Amino acid sequence: MIELGQCEIVSVFGPMASGKTFLIGQWLKNVNRYVRFDATGETMDDPTVEHIWKSPKALYERLTKPNYEHYFRIAYHPGNDLTEDFQWVVKCLWRLQVDKVLVCDEFHEVCNVNETPRFVQTMMRYARHDKLAVIGASQRIADVHKLFTSGSRKVIIFFSQEERDILAVRNRWGSDAAEMVENLRPLLYDDLSKTTRQVPQCLVISKGSKPQVYDFATGGYVNDVERRTDDTPDESEAGSEAGSGENDRESEGGEAGGIRESSQPSIERTDI
Amino acid sequence: MPKGYPKNKQPAEGGAIGGGESTAVRAQIREMLAPGQEEDFKDSLPEQTSNDESNPEGEVRVRRKRRTKEEIAREKGGSSGVEVDKRLERAKTKCAGLGAAGMVEAGFSMAGKGLNEKESEDVGDQFYLIAQKTGASADSWLFIVIYTVCLIAKLIMIRTQLGEEVGEWIKKMFEPKEEKQEGAQPQS
């Protein structure tokens, strides 16, 4: 599992049905204090969270409820004005003394590249000092403010072929990262049968580290395997001599870590 | 390592110093986004946001008419960055009474019966009232022409020989005539 650090800003990017929501859901299973700003009704049918509907007062009363202030898993459903509701949610969380997580699925709605409110900028700059972790997800990197991506301790990017997205990745993290995103294995999900036909990979860019490819099928980083292979050249050569088609394809992927669609078996899963 | 830095504490994952007992958020940080006392903050929280009834779907918002720079400046008392042409404003004010008041005053002064301040004001106000009623203003070319003619006529009456002659004629017109005595004998 990709580790979620405390009090970090984490950004998750990927086109629709790419695995963002699944990843966030996995993270939140282990978090005891979070508010999920649910503008799209993603958690409407989730009975494991408390639902609060466009009422900052109700939210704050719940957050500060005696004996329950150290445990809250809340989905906040905003009204028409997302920015107004988001501001209240941030204010309510900001006053809490404990470490907590704010999750926003469509982060570009409140942190747009063209118009980012002052309070969002302040939140991103000082969230760590307020013991606030922020997880923001968006479909396109180019849609969110650069302050968000540059301030993120961890950036997760799913497969994309959109030129604008690839260009945004290249501008922010270099051409190697852009190439890796293009070579990621995408999620293939059947909406009718609710089954996953292909488990995706994603690119993980942690501050101060090289980009790594994480494979949800194996639950590990692809680059780790390759690095070990690089350390033992004899074994690698032996593998190549064996003439395995899959190995050839992997070695072609190189730094991009590109294990493509046919290299992994289909895995029947219903939880993505 | 800086002096006084706790040696037994290592940076935790995510950059914060872990293992510390103090968990309080600094007041300066809290004040950045959610300032004030607890009670005041609670009172400021709305029960509901985005009240749909305030702007039902489909309702067309009435837009205010776009204002010119001059109108905006006038509303702000000329304190904005937009320059107000004071000379133009002054000229428009003078033109408001069509210049007729000036002509009347000039006529009386030529006749040697100049109007006092109160009378001048009354005459000016009266012609201003007439101009407003008839819609005469400096926005219309017609009234600007009328005002110009009146202004030149006034200057001619005051400053030229022709004006002096007219003035003499007016003076004579207003001079009291000697009444003829009945039964008076013609002088031989």
Image: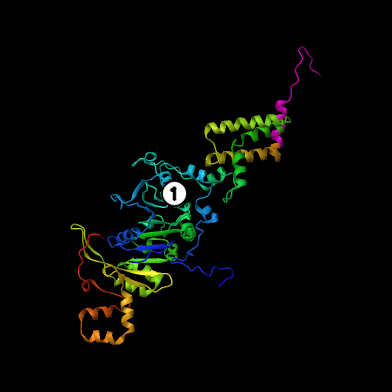
Name the residue nearer the viewer: A250 or B96.
Answer: A250
Locate residue B119, reporting x and y percent: 68, 29
Locate residue A120, reporting x and y percent: 45, 56
Residue at the top extreme of this rendering: B183
Q: Quadrant of the N terminus of chain A?
A: bottom left
B156 left or right of B56?
Answer: right
Q: Is residue A206 above or below residue B52?
A: below
What is the basis of the colouring in this image? rainbow
Pointer 1 local density, CA inside 10 Å: few below 14, some 14–19, many at least 20: many
Name the residue nearer the viewer: B28 or B157.
Answer: B28
Q: Chain of mark 1?
A: A
B6 left or right of A168?
Answer: right
Locate residue B104, reporting x and y percent: 65, 32
Q: How many marks?
A: 1
Q: Quadrant of residue B188?
A: top right
Q: Residue at x 53, y 70 (%)?
A: B7
Identify residue for label 1: A88
Q: Quadrant of residue A204?
A: bottom left
Q: Secondary structure at mark 1?
A: helix
Q: Amino acid at mark 1?
A: Trp
| Magenta highlight range | B164-188
